[in-house]
Amino acid sequence: MPRERTRSSFFKLHDYETHAKQNLSKMVFDFVAGGACDEVTLRKNREAFDQIRLNPRILAGQKDISTRTQILGQEIAFPAIISPIAFHGLVHKQGELATARAAQTAATIFVSSIASNYPVEEITAQAPERVWFQINFYKDQELTKKFVKRAETSGCKALVVTVDSATTGRRERDLANSFHLPKSLEMANFKKVGVKRELKPKRGGSALVDFRKEFVKPGPSWRDFEWLRGQTKLPVIVKGIMRPDDAIQAVRLGANAVWISNHGGRQLDTTAPSITVLPKIAEALGGQAEIIFDSGVRRGTDIVKAIALGATCVGIGRPIIWGLAESGERGAARVLQILKDELENAMAILGCDSVGGISRDFVDCD
């Protein structure tokens, strides 16, 4: 783990990534930063944002700028939440506990991965009312049910089911680095339900791939989603949607929100950048459900673009880990604050005083 800085002098998210690359082990940095195969989608996610132009409105008469908004009825300080990422303990000893506290400080939501290094009960205790829980479909249906019930009893406010990872993308950096967890870290949520399997080193392969092959259900279907929807009264978000027809089907079968994402370029390489499919999906849904968006958000202006094209809020993934690596809770909270400050600045210059006022005519992506 990197040595924490005593005072951050970073003013943009890229600085945190640079610090992480210089201070984390190659295996850990590549696990977070890497994508699938040639990482074409990973790069295109950013390039696509750069191609979208902003159209400021002058003399708009706006006074106080408010970035506050809601997602699934829950108020957040600005339209960004923390996306689920596994193994925060790899970059900071307090792992997901520190991340949850950062979400509490920033008045937003932390979507805790099922592959966390701390159990969900301890995570929700750090940020009451501000934690959602991410799960997959598992071969053992009873195991899935146990995770759902734990999410409910621990106080999670929503369930995020990841649907684009029935198998692990070919992440060649992880294969080359023989990705594994050190003995000091464990799969805490799995251990709590009696699964005591370690992610051991494996020469020429990723221990995470082996774990997923053993437990995650291959080829889940809409029938599995219907079953899951019937297991809980929590709001359910379907994460990993990239097509309008899948978004419509998810909502028809009871999804409370859809999460547009190509998994940050970590699953199937050469898929479309997520931002390019957002407007099509938003149009197809026609306001039937709220939309969360991720993949490539690095600036407050990116948040503006996503909201203008139909998103309710965005998810922030890798930058949170870079902030956590730099100075734990403080670094992760600072990453969120930078994004919020950039968003407020962009709205002021655009001539828009509220998130609800960020409309399609502020962007040009033709």
Image: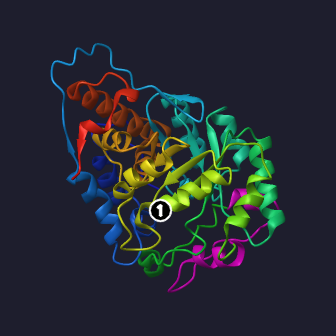
Q: What residue would you read off at disc 1?
A: 243
Based on the displayed image, in which of its 4 quarters is residue 358 positioned? top left
Q: Looking at numbered disc 1 in the image, what kind of residue is underneath it? A: Arg
Residue 17 position within the rendered picture, expressed as x and y whole percent measured from the top left: 33, 53
At x 63%, y 61%, the residue is 184
At x 69%, y 36%, the residue is 125
Residue 244 position within the rendered picture, expressed as x and y whole percent measured from the top left: 48, 58
In this rendering, position of residue 38 left or right of residue 237: left
Q: Secondary structure at mark 1?
A: loop
Residue 270 position within the rendered picture, expressed as x and y whole percent measured from the top left: 36, 73
Tell whether position 198 is magenta: yes
Residue 89 visible within the image: no
Give, as a single range, the part of the protein colored magenta.
187-216
Tell whether position 61 is magenta: no
Q: Is residue 178 above or below residue 185?
A: below
- Asked whether 85 or 251 is in front, the reply is 251
Residue 233 position within the rendered picture, expressed as x and y whole percent measured from the top left: 77, 43
Which residue of the protein is positioned furthest toward the bottom in this rendering?
204
Q: Is residue 350 above or below residue 260?
A: above
